[in-house]
């Protein structure tokens, strides 16, 4: 079904192995996004070098068009499952080389930075989420070009406000100094600073509970991604033979030498997709997570740090451990995310609609509802399956995203984890505790649910109710709806 409005996004990437894996998965979700740019940039970990400074871990400028060429080989199958997939030619037209010569280089205008300028100044009113898989330097250069062009003119304040209203800057780590040195001091942007959630799709996934780890282990990948066509043939796993020119030996995860030096690591296990959470944030539109960072969704749930900047301090309640955990705001979705990936991987080789699983479908209806304290509510939201599979329903209350429950004082304790040679905060745990209130729902496993708004709810309190509908298939797909109930 064609979507009239899609989240708009630009990808900036510095081209290491986890970026390439993230990009492969990203291509399978381009039907659900309005991709406005694919920009190669640099970072403190990867740059192409200058006349006086040699390249560092540089993997070249051709890998993105090469991946798009592989996408082209499965494109005719993909559009049988969703005609909204963009053409390979269109994706090629979006690729531009940005500021790549050095860490944090932003002095030169580039094809990539100038393409970003054209997007930021166009008349499309939708927000543009700029995914930052490497450094922010090409984005900084684009903003500096706009500032240099208009500052001091009568149009400057109007242009500046337009750009500030349009950009949502999603930063995976902070991989050069251009955000702190230029962007933050000159522009008032909405910024999502993901410094923990991404780690669970990067090199710290082994900190997850054993049950969740299964979808990152060899059996899962060999079952769901192997023999799924030329695009997924390039999805890199440990010890699978992939080798990147420009990367030092210690980062050549696909080689036998790496396996010999790391006997504790199983062949064909997960390497990383450390940048994927930046577009997970935009996906599963029924969850509506991209409407506000505090709502939560596949990319995790964020809270306000200062001004319009959001970070990873929100903790979700993990019923398996009885604790509030920051990582659970993304970990709760990981089985769904991987199952979704498996189903789409099958679209690459399934040459007919009936040979693959597709999403349960809902009717259009308003899911923002005004309620009163003490009111009993019944919601009915039946779905249908395009392949005729039976459906399973699950209603739940997203307590942590709802303002009725004040969870801001949950006691937290920092836990550090290793990401390569760095330590990052990968979790914040409280002592085991229970939610202060229950929200009983009758019919939570059916298409119709009944519940009562607490009698002490105050004007403006919100309740976020989630509906998940999964088809009962070998590679199931799940659709979501989020109801936001506001006491009026």
Image (cartoon, helix red, strand yellow):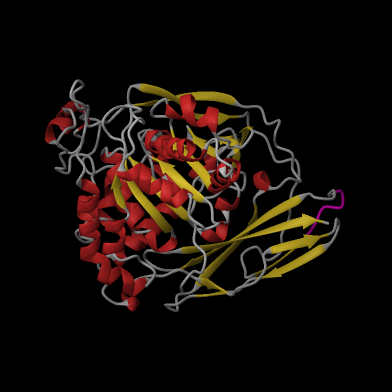
Residue 301: tell me if it is visible. no
Q: Is residue 53 left or right of residue 213?
A: left
Residue 317 vertical placement versus 95 (above, below)? above
Q: Quadrant of residue 110?
A: top left
Residue 454 falls within the magenta-colored stretch: yes
Residue at 28 percent of width and 34 percent of height: 100
Q: Position of residue 126 (x, y in %)?
A: 54, 56
Residue 101 vertical placement versus 436 (above, below)? above
Q: Farthest residue to the front: give it.
A: 153
Q: Is residue 108 left or right of residue 231?
A: right
Q: Nearer the viewer, residue 45 or 484?
A: 45
Q: Nearer the viewer, residue 324 or 319?
A: 324
Residue 458: tell me if it is visible. yes
Residue 99 falls within the magenta-colored stretch: no
Residue 178 vertical placement versus 407 (above, below)? above
Main SS of the magenta part reads loop
Q: Position of residue 287 (x, y in %)?
A: 56, 57
Q: Is residue 145 left or right of residue 407?
A: left
Q: Nearer the viewer, residue 237 or 222?
A: 237
Q: Is residue 81 left or right of residue 225?
A: right
Residue at 81 percent of width and 63 percent of height: 376
Q: Position of residue 315 (x, y in %)?
A: 60, 36
Residue at 40 percent of width and 68 percent of height: 473
Residue range (magenta) = 452-456
Q: Position of residue 165 (x, y in %)?
A: 58, 46
């Amino acid at each position: 079904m064609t979507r009239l409005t899609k989240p708009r996004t630009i990808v900036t990437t510095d081209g290491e192995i986890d970026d390439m894996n993230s990009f492969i998965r990203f291509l399978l979700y381009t039907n659900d996004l309005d991709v406005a740019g694919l920009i190669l940039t640099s970072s403190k970990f990867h740059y192409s070098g200058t006349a006086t400074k040699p390249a560092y871990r540089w993997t070249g400028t051709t890998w993105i068009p090469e991946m798009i060429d592989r996408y082209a080989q499965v494109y005719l199958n993909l559009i049988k499952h969703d005609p909204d997939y963009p053409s390979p030619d269109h994706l090629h037209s979006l690729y531009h080389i940005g500021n790549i010569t050095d860490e944090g280089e932003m002095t030169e205008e580039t094809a990539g930075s100038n393409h970003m300028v054209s997007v930021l100044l166009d008349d499309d009113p939708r927000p543009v989420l700029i995914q930052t898989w490497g450094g922010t330097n090409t984005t900084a250069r684009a903003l500096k070009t706009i500032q240099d062009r208009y500052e001091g003119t009568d149009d400057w304040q109007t242009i500046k406000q337009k750009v500030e209203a349009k950009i949502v800057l999603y930063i995976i780590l902070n991989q050069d100094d251009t955000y702190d040195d230029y962007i933050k001091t000159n522009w008032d942007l909405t910024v999502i600073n993901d410094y923990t959630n991404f780690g669970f799709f990067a090199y710290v996934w082994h900190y997850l509970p054993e049950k969740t780890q299964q979808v990152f282990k060899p059996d899962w990948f060999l079952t769901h991604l192997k023999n799924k066509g030329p695009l997924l043939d390039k999805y890199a796993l440990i010890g699978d033979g992939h080798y990147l020119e420009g990367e030092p030996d210690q980062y050549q995860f696909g080689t036998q030498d790496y396996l010999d030096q790391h006997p504790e690591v199983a062949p064909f296990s997960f390497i990383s997709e450390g940048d994927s959470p930046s577009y997970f944030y935009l996906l599963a539109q029924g969850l509506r997570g991209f409407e506000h960072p505090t709502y939560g969704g596949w990319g995790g749930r964020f809270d306000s740090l200062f001004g319009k900047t959001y970070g990873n301090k929100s903790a979700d309640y993990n019923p398996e451990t009885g604790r509030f955990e920051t990582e659970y705001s993304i970990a709760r979705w990981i089985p769904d995310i991987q199952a979704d990936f498996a189903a789409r991987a099958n679209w690459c080789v399934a040459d007919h609609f009936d040979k693959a699983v597709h999403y349960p479908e809902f009717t259009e209806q308003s899911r923002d509802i005004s309620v009163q304290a003490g009111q009993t509510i019944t919601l009915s939201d039946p779905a249908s399956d395009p392949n005729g599979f039976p459906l399973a329903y699950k209603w739940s209350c997203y307590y942590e995203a709802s303002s009725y429950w004040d969870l801001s004082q949950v006691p937290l304790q920092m836990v550090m984890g290793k990401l390569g040679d760095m330590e990052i905060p990968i979790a914040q745990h409280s002592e085991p505790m229970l939610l202060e209130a229950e929200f009983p729902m009758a019919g939570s496993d059916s298409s119709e649910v009944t519940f009562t708004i607490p009698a002490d709810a105050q004007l403006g309190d919100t309740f976020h109710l989630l509906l998940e509908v999964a088809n009962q298939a070998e590679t199931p797909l799940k659709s979501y709806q989020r109801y936001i109930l506001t006491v009026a």
